[in-house]
Image: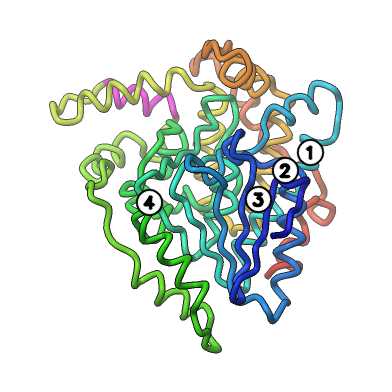
Amino acid sequence: MQQHANGEITVELRNRVAHLTLNRPQALNALSYEMVVSMATLFTQWSTDDAINAVVMRGAGEKSFCAGGDIRALRDSALNNGTLHHDFFIDEYRLDYQLHRYVKPVICLLDGIVMGGGMGISQGSGFRIVGPKTKMAMPETGIGLFPDVGGSYFLSRSSVGLYLGLTGLMIKASDALYANLADRFMTSESIAALVGQLDSHKWSNKPASDVALMIDEHATSPADAPTLAPLQSAIALHFAPQKSVAEMIASLESEARPEFQPWAANTAALLKTRSPTLLEVTRRQLNRGSKMTLAECFRMELGIVYHCFEHGDLMEGIRAVILDKDNDPHWNPATLAELKPEAIAGFFAPRWDPNHHPLANLEKLFG
């Protein structure tokens, strides 16, 4: 077994398959900067290594694939005038894009917690495998952030993406499939059987086809039906992208149909706990992302995330939710009614000449 990033990533090479494990189980496999850099190096090497036909990614332990980025370290960097909170996102977004464009099949085993940065490194895979323990979310608005790591692209192309991005709702496997944020479901036993089959498989000259056939053999359907399906019409009504977030909340609070009233009331109440500023930023981010290429989405997100560290709500959200755990963030401003259009526009203001953007060369590097 190989160890990388001070042991935070382990790699086993078996039968022409690279098995990469995120190895920070005590931190729910949250991504450190060293992990991001090591993964980029490994995936670059494997892309041209004829001895590697496919890659399997999983998280160590029983609970989590990856619960996001190491947000505490990023906050410390910002507070101490460091560079980590800038360098991390440049390299993370570059890695995410690389994985979306990867030339070999990547199987992501998502039978556990998948949030934030974990979504970033898995959504580009053609083989997003969820299981009975999957808990998936983009909960960023709850800490004064926005659904980044390519969320502008993959959430804006889901029929429930705006709803999930604004609320930060955690969903299970059946809803992940419904939202087009996963590809196939497997039981824990089937996932183990798939890994075992990969160890003994006789590869053809079309590894991607081999992987697809193996996954077809082991995939089943979740036992529970998606909870989002019966809400689809209500979600489409209340979360229409042309509505401001304030109008969405007003729409939810006016819901009169008995079958939707409890959900609408709970959803409106949940939105009122999120950062007002980042709710409106997220709405505009996803609206813009729906018309952008993947690379353009990452370039937009990098400017937004830099502004988040300057704005203040992110630092306060991390304090309240992750550090002090009082879950009582003091947002600035405190309400949607106090939002100023120019403050929202600031998140999208160009920071770099297009030719000198830190992510200007994504297409040249990875296609």
Asked if marks 1 and 2 touch (Cβ < 8 Å), the reply is: yes
Residue lying furthest bottom: 205
Q: Earlier in the sequence, mark 2 or mark 3?
A: 2
x and y percentages locating residue 159 in the rendered image: 36, 49
Q: Earlier in the sequence, mark 4 or mark 2?
A: 2
Q: Residues within 10 Å of mark 3 (few under 14, many from 20)?
A: many
Q: Residue at x 52, y 55 (%)?
A: 123
Residue 67 visible? The answer is: yes
Residue occupied by mark 1: 86
Left-right relation of 57 to 309: left
Of tags 1 and 4, the one toward the viewer is 4
Asked if marks 3 and 1 touch (Cβ < 8 Å), the reply is: no
Provide the secondary structure element on which disc 3 rests: helix
Residue occupied by mark 2: 89
Q: CA distance from mark 1 to mark 2?
A: 6 Å
The stretch drawn in magenta includes residue 247: yes
Provide the secondary structure element on which disc 2 rests: helix
Residue occupied by mark 4: 131
Q: Amino acid at mark 3?
A: Phe
x and y percentages locating residue 94 in the rendered image: 71, 54
The stretch drawn in magenta includes residue 12: no
Q: Which residues are magenta?
A: 245-253
